[in-house]
Image: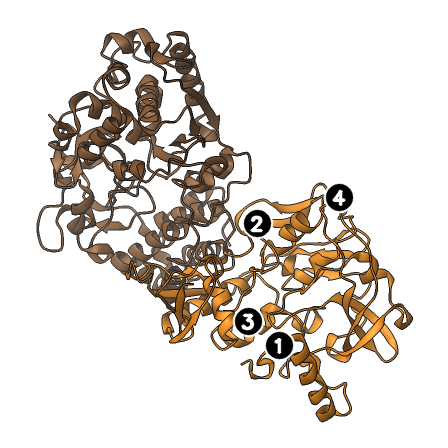
Amino acid sequence: MGKKLLIHNDRVPGIHTLDVYRAHGGYASVEKALKSMTPDQVTEEVKKSGLRGRGGAGFPTGMKWSFLAKPEGVPRYLVCNADESEPGTFKDRYLMEKIPHALIEGMITSSYALGANQSYIYIRGEYFYVARILETAIAEAYAAGWLGKNILGTNYSLELSVQVGGGAYICGEETALLESLEGKRGNPRIKPPFPAVAGLWGCPTVVNNVETIAAVCPIVMMGGEEYAKIGVGKSTGTKLISASGHINKPGVYEIELGLPVEEFIYSEEYCGGIRNGKKMKAVVAGGSSVPILPTELILKTAKGEPRLMTYESLADGGFQTGTMLGSGGFIVMDEDTSIVKNLFTFTRFYHHESCGQCSPCREGTGWMEKILKKILDGKGTLADVDLLWDIQSKIEGKTICPLGEAAAWPVAAALRHFKHEFEAYVKNPSSIKDVKHYYRLNNLVEA
Amino acid sequence: MPKVTIDGIEIEVPKGTTILQAARMIGPEVAPPTMCYYSKLKTSGGYCRTCIVKVTKGSAQNPNPMPKPVASCRTEVMDGMEVQNVTSPEILEARKGVVEFLLINHPLDCPVCDQAGECSLQDLGYEHGAAKTRYEFKRREFERIDIGKYVQLHMTRCILCYRCVKTAEQITDNRVHGVIHRGDAGEISTYIEKAIDNEFSGNVIDVCPVGALTDKTFRFKQRVWFTKPVEAHRKCTTKSATGQTCSGKVRLWYKGEDILRVTARKDQWGEVEEFICNDCRFEHKKTSDWTIEGPSPVNRHSVISQNHYNHLNELKVEVMKHQKALGFININKRP
């Protein structure tokens, strides 16, 4: 049984209310930080903990905080990125829905560390009911004096607001999120300047994922060094994994980083194996944008070592034979899955969500979708398969924000590991099964 | 002042200069092409990705190369930076990809497009594009929209460079158009069919790199290469609410004795030198309205320099004199 730090109380009745949350040790980190620590000490603990951003990129949080510019007389902001839109990822929703005060507690402690007196939670539009839960919890926290002026009688004050997004994947990109929060069209900004220097309304801003902010509470309580003992190497602490797909027990699991992938998929404690006794075919380990890996490469690295649920182990072998931990959206596919259909679904998503600012992503994502549709319609050629590879290579790394990569990587990985499936569809269109049913599910028409 | 090396040529530039500006200072041989960047418009650039370059050395302090190609128009030079543009096969290949992306949803009907002959995308495609398209699906299409008395918008040709949006925002006091929808469904549009109506609105035509925004008083009157550009000026006092003044310095496009069109003057990089007002542009089409300065400098390779001058050699001398006076360099050496 692994250690749980974030959602250990998720089954306690009434844990979404302040009283129950407090009775189970809630808001202790705020008390500890505000009464006995300086903001720099909190940052120092986070640095020592080795905590890395849980939104996908895995950037060390303590380092991100220390980059925050602190000019005199300029407000600083902490913005929580709750725009969880990566297909296959639903961990933040679970956390906010079940234990909203865990995020609010983390926001207060983190804002104190950063010296922010106004913080925001930017939540995706589709999570409107979660936003209501958060707003209720924030009202409770204000009433009990955890938010507002002079928290716990100290001279630290914090205002916390929830902002609901309009429903765009791109607003999960931090600079697009800031644009949207400012009330503008959610287009990513060109970096530099980075938000740590000029973020929200041109002021220094830190943008962190929900899970990252929630993890600050246990770090303050147990101390950074103690937290760093959990996990393997530079992947410290626990991580929420949203497991979905053809497994017996889909859901959100908190794991200690370093758990073997095989154990995560097959043990009864976690996913419980592949459903209906089928064999596993492939896994997308960290949300739809990370490269897909076939069974032999997800269980073992190319060197033959068992693959672990850590940032390093999953990335072992680069993109040739590895993938990324990403946001922890763990999608398992069984032997009956069509990789081509799966890729079409992903590509269609990225085409729909491209903001359209820069040309490679705007035009390339739509082009790839059209080619995949052509292949599924049974009209593809071998040249189309090569063209797909060429298009993705011309999108990757050429765009303003990482959405270009997010759209290109799944295509590249599917072609790298499953090219034979594309070729089989092209050479023998009668092998494309159930495509009408698939189109109906997706509101598409056959060409 | 920081020193930067672009394609092996070192140049010292003022602090805050972008890689693109530094490359332009060296000359057109190493200057990356641009489709969305416009030196006269703040925050323009970064979108089209045609100007991407490879930074092989970040700076003297931090000599690591940058991991990805960068948009040269939005990246400031650092002291000791080393940049590859035309010397990097990788970049040329990537640029070819960008041109292809820009063209897949652009109609390839230049023979019936009013912009042909002075179109940045045409030039870009000619220099960096492939001979054949690999795109075989339906292209994006829109209806033509009249936005005001003088300007017509044909979104089908638009490459979403945002230049017209920034022009309206920065030189007029009331921007009524912008980009609506997202991704490849995005389009330039006015707020519910509103007209773009202010004294500097005509400049959106000049900044448009393609034939998406065209002059209604000139549309389909004449192919540009049958008209003759001449520099002229008049005294003009138009001032916008944001303080933008009209320079009164224009380029007249003659066919025989008639002025068919008035535009702002464009420099070597295809950018407007000084913005002009609608009064000069649309309402003064008689020779007697203007003080003629002489023939406009035209790139020898441009289709516009074809056909209409009888004594080409005389003209060349004239043009070069003119270029010298205006401070142009190397215009005839442009590849």
Other residues around mark 2 within 10 Å, as few (<14) / some (14–19) / many (≥20):
some
Q: State left or right for residue B124 relative to residue A347.
A: right
Determine if marks 1 and 2 fall on one subunit.
yes
Residue position marked by numbered label 1 in the rendering: B328
Residue B172 rendering spot, x and y as whole percentages: 71, 48
CB atoms of marks 3 and 1 within 8 Å: no
Q: Which mark is residue B185?
A: 2
The mark that comes first in sequence, 1 or 2, is 2
- The answer to whether residue B106 is seen in the rendering is yes
Q: State left or right for residue B55 relative to residue A44.
A: right
Subunit of label 4 = B
At label 2, the amino acid type is Ala
Residue A302, relative to residue B313: is it above or below?
A: above
CB atoms of marks 3 and 4 within 8 Å: no
| For discs 3 and 1, the disc positioned in front in the rendered view | 1
Determine if marks 3 and 2 fall on one subunit.
yes
Other residues around mark 1 within 10 Å, as few (<14) / some (14–19) / many (≥20):
some
Residue A139 rendering spot, x and y as whole percentages: 43, 12
The mark that comes first in sequence, 3 or 1, is 3
The mark that comes first in sequence, 3 or 4, is 3
Residue B40, relative to residue A307: is it above or below?
A: below
The mark that comes first in sequence, 3 or 2, is 3
